[in-house]
Amino acid sequence: GAVVSQHPSRVICKSGTSVKIECRSLDFQATTMFWYRQFPKQSLMLMATSNEGSKATYEQGVEKDKFLINHASLTLSTLTVTSAHPEDSSFYICSARTGTNTEAFFGQGTRLTVV
Amino acid sequence: QKEVEQNSGPLSVPEGAIASLNCTYSDRGSQSFFWYRQYSGKSPELIMSIYSNGDKEDGRFTAQLNKASQYVSLLIRDSQPSDSATYLCAVRSDYKLSFGAGTTVTVRA
């Protein structure tokens, strides 16, 4: 399958600071990237969908001003958690696909801990 | 009603046995169905995809789809300790993938 690289794998930050997470498709061009959040023992919850060159579409209940998504190229999307708080501590996972009806491949995930 | 429902488990099976996982979904218009395996602390990895009614086999894994009943299942034959993980059912409607909560499988050696 295609390779999606997510960085960093773990990050600890202080409350009130911002954290940027990168998601790269290494061997394909990703027209669409998805950002998920997963709390312990829960399933993946879609936060937003981003298409290259356009604004992200956020799911209901996800604050777009807090979770900034940029998909500036066909191989890179970033998620910035602004003014992070302890309740933002979670496992953030990106996925990418090449077209509408193709499979999505997941990055390794980022464990964010806000202290 | 949740979009994708799975029994949370845990499902415990002895090594060599068959593990049977079930999933139901609410959107009748869904067209694509996936099973992912997720080890603790890791991101999901795709193990099966199925798009049409019937069975699809890949090695020790068999996925079954019944669109009329809005039901998807996964069978793991000859279960191995390395199969111990959480299995997520995912259903695609429009452009979005919706995930079930996952079934935790433990294979006893």
Image (spheres, rainbow, N blue to C red):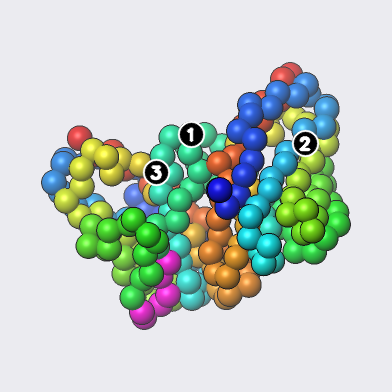
Magenta range? A49-54
Q: What is the count of numbered marks?
A: 3
Q: Is residue B101 visible?
A: yes
- Which residue does the numbered mark 1 point to in the structure image? A41
- Which residue does the numbered mark 2 point to in the structure image? B20
- Is A33 placed above or below B98 here? below
Seen at 79% across and 45% down, the residue is B61
Q: Is residue B47 visible?
A: no
The answer to whether residue B66 is left or right of residue A55 is right
**Based on the displayed image, in which of its 4 quarters is residue B13 positioned?**
top right
Chain to which mark 1 belongs = A
Chain to which mark 3 belongs = A
Q: Secondary structure at mark 2?
A: strand
- Which residue does the numbered mark 3 point to in the structure image? A91
Seen at 37% across and 59% down, the residue is A60
Q: Residues within 10 Å of mark 1 (few under 14, many from 20)?
A: few
Q: Amino acid at mark 1?
A: Lys
Q: Secondary structure at mark 1?
A: loop
Residue B83, percent from left and from top:
69, 34
**Based on the displayed image, in which of its 4 quarters is residue A113 positioned?**
top left
